[in-house]
Amino acid sequence: RASETQLEEPSTIHVLDRSELQAPIAGFGPLFAVVLTLLVAVVVWLQPARLLLPFPWQSSERAAFERLLHTSTTQRIDRSSRTWFLLEADYPDSLEEMVAVGMLASSDLDDSNGRRLRYVKGVASYRLVPLEDGEPVEDLAREESINDDFLLDSQFLPETSGGPPALYLID
């Protein structure tokens, strides 16, 4: 009977408490969940197309989605610029002017990929060009003008003789 195991004396048996059974890393579970949630939120905020369309075969859909995001930003800027033109009879000197008066959010100064937008004012137009590493991305450049816009172009307004210029409200 040499193969029988010997039981220890009851005085040497150590009973473990429940707190000793938990792994030392177990207390970090809620912290890990918070960090993971923040990481996902940052990815969604900075690169939503990467999270929504992550697979390589979705690259064309991802590119279309990013173009839509870029277009929405430039349309917000265009609406604000046209409103500014209606009020001031000129485009603003910079996008920061429109941010200062609340016509644009400061987040609208960057496109959907985080590239800074360069705003160049012309006589009757403006040009938006995204900058990547300080270099313009001409493929995504957009130019807007008042030409052929009946709200802004003075050639569509009837000539008035004397007095203050008429204000046309279109409802």
Image: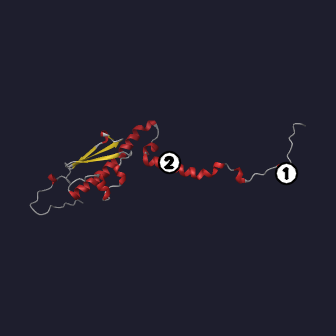
- Does 104 appear above or below 50? below
User: Which of the 4 image quarters holds residue 83?
Assistant: bottom left
Quadrant housing the N terminus: top right
Residue 154, x across and y down, in percent:
16, 53
Query: Looking at numbered disc 1 in the image, what kind of residue is underneath it?
Result: Ser
User: Which of the 4 image quarters holds residue 66?
Assistant: top left
- Tell me what residue is drawn at x 46 percent, y 44 percent: 51
Between 70 and 92, the one lying in front of the other is: 92
| Residue position for label 1 | 11
Q: Judging from the image, what secondary structure is the residue with disc 2 in?
A: helix
The span from disc 2 to disc 1 (Cα, nearest Å) is: 51 Å
**Residue located farthest toward the bottom when viewing the structure as drawn:** 163
Q: Judging from the image, what secondary structure is the residue with disc 1 in?
A: helix
Tag 2–tag 1 contact (CB < 8 Å): no
**Residue located farthest toward the left when viewing the structure as drawn:** 161
Residue 45, x across and y down, in percent:
44, 49
| Residue position for label 2 | 39
Query: Looking at numbered disc 2 in the image, what kind of residue is underneath it?
Result: Leu
